[in-house]
Image (cartoon, rainbow, N blue to C red):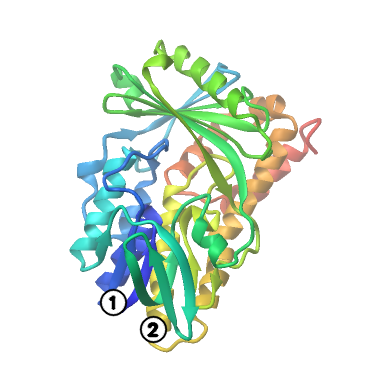
């Protein structure tokens, strides 16, 4: 029997496994995929995550982004060079996720790939997890199986707030200038946005609706293809995929009896810029602490996890959602009066790099946006 079974070996699950194993706990990580595996994602990572791990991420960082280019309907550009911040990392998710998993295994976690979870039941104080490879038991359970989390459903958590998203990976030559630039486009998607991150041998384009769960998937593909063509790339040479995002729902319980949600299974996605990796890693760290404390006898450890995540990152995501609501009421005006202002562009860049939170800028941004005709 294990101290903890973790379902899902993405950033949230591997983060939990790494920290639990490092504390000396027995950990089993299960994932239905074989690793390394392809993962649809822009792959932008805040360098601030390094402080949560005792390992060197440099081997999986392909580029360092130090400037941002914003557009509205693929025109009216505004370029911002990020000042006084550590450049954002660009990674390939297959390599990044596999690296994190390897770090967890190096600390003593056990990993079983190609194992699909079929059921999970709490028998007394023991979780019995039935899989395609037999049954496993543990004292605690962490669900880290992504946006459309089967584990969250099995554990009786609230229905996720899913919204359509898509990715397009296109090979191509990356110039020195584009290699250090992250691109964001507003206005092409109603109630959504697009972004493009440079990689070593091409570009990762992404699109998502953030204010309308009924957005059309075919519109995502059409606009992403147009966006890629703007870069003089042939989108037909790329790899296109659709996937939902699970957006944050305020004051959401993230624990049940001897079980926790982390990462996108917990809705840890930024509704304004689409960031999901850093909040997934954060919840993974916090979940590991909670389970370790619970094993040590702290009866309120799991409830404190829900409370702490809601009060820290959850509050930050709620402010992002509020700002997104203001922005998308009149996106063209908000773009010109907000994003295009040099100071605002710098602030968004610092949020991307993990050196500012929405909580630190929300009040000032709200005051400015509310005075814009059509928004306030």
Q: Residues within 10 Å of mark 2 (few under 14, many from 20)?
A: some
Dot 2: what SS? helix
Q: Is residue 193 left or right of residue 44?
A: right
Position above or below: 233 against 263? above
Among all residues in the image, which is located at the extreme bottom?
297
Residue 221 in the image, given as x and y percentages of width and height:
54, 23
Q: How many marks?
A: 2
**C-alpha separation, residue under disc 2 versus residue under disc 1:** 9 Å
**Which image quadrant is residue 157 in?**
bottom right
Rendered residue at 63%/26% (across/down) = 189
| Badge 2 vs badge 1, beta-carbon distance below 8 Å | yes
Q: Quadrant of the C terminus?
A: top right
Q: Earlier in the sequence, mark 2 or mark 1?
A: 1
Position above or below: 62 against 301? above
Q: Quadrant of the N terminus?
A: bottom left
Q: Which mark is residue 116?
A: none
**Which image quadrant is residue 287 in?**
bottom left
**Residue 226 in view (yes/no):** yes
From the viewer's side, name the closer residue of 373 and 151: 151
Position above or below: 149 against 203? below
The residue singled out by tag 2 in the image is 295
Residue 40 in the image, given as x and y percentages of width and height:
41, 37
Residue 138 in the image, given as x and y percentages of width and height:
37, 77
Position above or below: 263 against 260? above
Q: Residues within 10 Å of mark 1 (few under 14, many from 20)?
A: many
**Residue 54 in view (yes/no):** no
Dot 1: what SS? loop
The residue singled out by tag 1 in the image is 25
Residue 340 in the image, given as x and y percentages of width and height:
59, 26
């Amino acid at each position: 029997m294990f101290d903890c079974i973790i379902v899902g070996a993405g950033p949230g699950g591997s983060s939990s496994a790494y920290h639990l194993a490092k504390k000396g706990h027995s950990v089993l990580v299960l994932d239905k995929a074989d690793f390394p595996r392809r993962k649809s994602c822009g792959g932008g990572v805040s360098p601030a995550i390094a402080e949560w791990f005792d390992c060197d991420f440099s081997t999986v960082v392909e580029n360092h982004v130090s400037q941002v280019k914003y557009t509205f309907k693929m025109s009216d550009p505004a370029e911002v060079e990020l000042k006084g911040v550590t450049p954002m990392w660009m990674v390939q998710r297959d390599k990044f996720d596999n690296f994190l998993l390897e770090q967890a295994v190096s600390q003593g976690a056990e990993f079983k790939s190609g194992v699909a979870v079929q059921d999970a039941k709490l028998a007394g104080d023991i979780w019995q997890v039935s899989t395609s490879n037999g049954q496993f038991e543990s004292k605690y359970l962490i669900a880290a199986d992504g946006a459309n989390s089967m584990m969250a459903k099995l554990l009786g958590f609230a229905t996720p707030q899913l919204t359509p998203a898509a990715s397009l990976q296109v090979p191509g030559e990356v110039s020195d200038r584009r290699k250090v630039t992250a691109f964001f486009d507003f206005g092409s998607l109603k109630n959504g946005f697009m972004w493009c991150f440079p990689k070593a041998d091409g570009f990762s384009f992404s699109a998502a609706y953030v204010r309308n769960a009924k957005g059309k998937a075919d519109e995502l593909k059409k606009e992403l293809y147009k966006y890629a063509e703007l870069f003089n790339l042939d989108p037909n040479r790329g790899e296109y995929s659709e996937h939902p995002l699970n957006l944050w729902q305020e004051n959401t319980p993230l624990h049940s009896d001897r079980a926790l949600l982390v990462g996108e299974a917990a809705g840890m996605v930024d509704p304004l810029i689409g960031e999901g990796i850093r909040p997934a890693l954060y919840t993974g760290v916090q979940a590991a602490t909670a389970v370790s404390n619970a094993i040590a006898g702290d009866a309120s450890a799991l409830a404190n996890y829900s409370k702490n995540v809601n009060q820290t990152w959850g509050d930050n995501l709620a402010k992002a959602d509020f700002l997104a609501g203001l922005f998308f009421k009149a996106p063209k005006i908000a773009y010109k009066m907000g994003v295009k202002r040099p100071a605002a562009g710098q602030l968004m860049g610092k949020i991307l790099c993990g050196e500012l939170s929405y909580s630190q800028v929300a009040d000032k941004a709200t005051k400015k946006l509310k005075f814009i005709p059509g928004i306030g």
